[in-house]
Amino acid sequence: MKLGNSNARISFYPLVRYRLPRSFYACDALELAPKLIGCYVVHRLSPIRIGRIVEVEAYRGPDDAACHARVGLTKRTKTLLGEEGHAYIFRIYGMYDCLNVVCGSKGWGHAVLIRGVEPVLGFPEGKRTDGPGRVCNALGITKDDDGCTLVGEALYLLPRTSSPVIQTSARVGVAYAGAYAEQPWRFLDASSPHVSRPPSRMIGLGNQTGENRSNTNPFRL
């Protein structure tokens, strides 16, 4: 298997033989998140789409005030609180779907949000891939894919082929989470032009305090 940047050549097919096993996801979100940088996400549409992961965020279960698992088991969080190695897809602002990799073990509520990918193969011309909503749009992933196994043949991840230099920061758009907003749980390959560039007011607590902070959650759980 040979994979690189947008001009990649794929020298072996089917790629599914190289997909990451379920055991890869059986760990804390903070452990998984940096391991995902440089891995490849594959969606078997026609044509197949492949993107190299360059930005992620870790969400660590019910104790993490920015994590959906904080509300417990609901129809919406069923996948998040389910078994590792599945895709948890949620929608923000009523229009943008977001891809998360469920990890840990059943009931943990841990997941890693994919915030940016570098186009490798099959992406529509001109599609941006910086930001979680754009990732799903470019990969052709929708809310209907929620609960999809990541060890099947439709949607899966491939191991990285090189070791990127990883940087961290606080997460984006989670000022409502108080102290958890400042945790450095965003991981990125800063050399990639496909990393999102949110304004500083959206990172960590930003410049939001008090009442404004409590009203910034777009997920409406």
Image (spheres, rainbow, N blue to C red):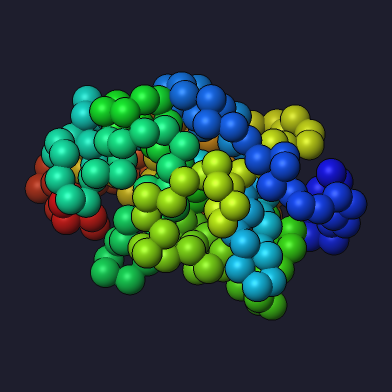
Q: Residue at x 49, y 57 (%)?
A: 131
Q: Is residue 169 left or right of residue 220?
A: right
The answer to whether one can see residue 200 in this image is: no
Query: In the orientation shown, which residue stands out farthest toward the left?
Result: 211
Q: Is residue 74 above or below residue 105?
A: below
Query: In the orientation shown, which residue stands out farthest toward the bottom?
Result: 125
Q: Is residue 6 above or below residue 150?
A: below
The answer to whether one can see residue 91 in this image is: yes
List x then y, in percent, for residue 76.
Answer: 21, 51
Q: Is residue 108 above or below residue 196?
A: above
Tell me the quarter of the image containing the N terminus: top right
The image quarter in which residue 94 lies: bottom left
List x then y, in percent, for residue 200.
Answer: 42, 48
Q: Nearer the viewer, residue 134 or 157?
A: 157
Q: Residue at x 59, y 59 (%)?
A: 43
Count of labels shown?
0
Q: Nearer the viewer, residue 214 or 94?
A: 94
List x then y, in percent, for residue 67.
Answer: 27, 38
Q: Is residue 169 left or right of residue 7?
A: left
The image quarter in which residue 93 lies: bottom left
Q: Residue at x 40, y 25 (%)?
A: 104
The image quarter in which residue 119 lies: bottom right
Q: Residue at x 52, y 44 (%)?
A: 150
List x then y, in percent, for residue 78.
Answer: 24, 44
Q: Nearer the viewer, residue 46 or 35?
A: 46
